Amino acid sequence: MRASAAIAVFGALLTLPGVASAGCNHIDHEGRGYVVCDVDPAQTELRLFHRAADGGILGSFARVDAMLEAEGKSLVFAMNGGMYHADRAPVGLYIEDGQERAPAIASAGPGNFGMLPNGVLCLMADSASVIETRTYLADPPACRHATQSGPMLVIDGDLHPRFLPDSDSRFVRNGVGVRADGAAVFAISDRPVTFHEFARLFRDVLDTPNALYLDGKVSRLYAPDLGRSDIGLPMGPIVGAVADAPR
C-alpha cells in the first residue's frame, strides 16, 4: 500500500464509533502487516504497570486486568512497555504514579537500548510525548508515568541515523509514537521487520514526528477488540489504556 493510501485508510478507521478512545486496527505498509492502536490521553487514561501491591512483578496482561478489577476498572489495550533486566526490573528511567522507581541512563551502551539517541515515553494527565533522553534530562517534564527505551525510531521527523535500509536483522517489534496533537500511537508488527522498515511506518504512515522503540522478539499485545491477548514469559513494564469496568 502506498504511504498516502495507508494514511487515508488509517485516518478513516479512527473516525469509526468507539475507535478513538483505544482503537486497534490491522494496517498494511509496504507489504508488511501491523496492528496499530490509537489512544488519546485526553479521553482515555494511559498508565504504566510493573508491580502489584504486594511488590510482586505483575508480568502479564491478565494480572494487570485483575488488579484493575479491584479498582472498578478494566484494561482495554496494553503492550510491553520498555526493556527490562532478567529480574524484570526496568532498564533506564521508570516513573509510575509520579514516583521515580529507576533513574534515566544517558550514556551509550551495548544493545538496542544503548544505541543513542534513545528516548522516554512521558504520559501526563491529558497528553503524551516521546522525548529524546538528553532533552528530557535537560528539562524534565512532570510525567505522571514514564518509561525509557531505545533506540528512538523517529527524531523530529527523521529516522534514527544508524538504521540501515538493507539490514538483515529482523524481529517482531513494537513501539510508540506521538502525533502533534498529543495522541499516542502504538504499533506491533505481524512478522519480523527491520528497524528501518518499522521506523518508516511511524514516519510515513502514522504521522508521528517522534517515535520510540519499546522492544523486539518479546513484543506482545493485548487488544480484546481484536480477540488478542498474547502470552509468554513474564514481562517487565507494561503500558496500557484503562477504562471504567462495565456495570
Image (cartoon, grey):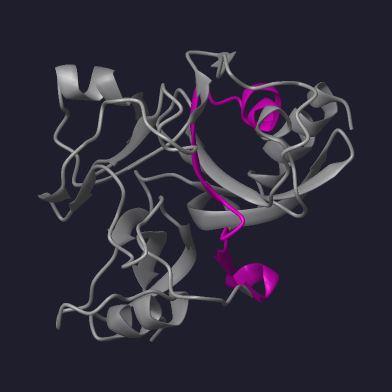
Q: Is residue 33 above or below residue 206?
A: below
Residue 111 forms part of the magenta stretch: no
Relative to 79, say whether 69 is above or below: below
Instruction: Give residue 57's quadrant in the image.
Output: bottom left
Q: Nearer the viewer, residue 43 or 59?
A: 59
Q: Left or right of 31: which side holds 225?
A: left
Query: Relative to residue 45, is residue 78 drawn left or right?
Result: right
217 or 6, which is in the foreground? 217
Query: Residue 168, located in which quarter of the rendered image?
Result: top right
Asked if one can make out residue 186 in the rendered structure from this viewpoint, the answer is: no
Residue stretch in magenta: 199-228
Q: Residue at x 25, y 86 (%)?
A: 70
Task: Please say whether residue 232 is visible from this viewpoint.
Answer: yes
Identity of the residue furthest to the left in this view? 99
| Quarter placement of the C terminus | bottom left
| Residue at x 28% of width, y 66% of height | 50
Task: From the top left corner, tell me how far across and down residue 120 is, in percent.
Answer: 33, 35
* x then y, percent, for residue 147: 31, 45
Residue 216 magenta-highlighted? yes
- Viewport quadrant of the N terminus: top right
147 vs 17, nearest the viewer = 147
* Residue 154 in picture, x, y percent from top left: 54, 22
Question: Is residue 60 rendered to the left or right of residue 42?
Answer: right
The x, y position of residue 178, in whole percent, is: 46, 32
* Residue that extends furthest to the front in the rendered view of this protein: 110
36 on left or right of 148 = right
Residue at 28 percent of width and 60 percent of height: 89
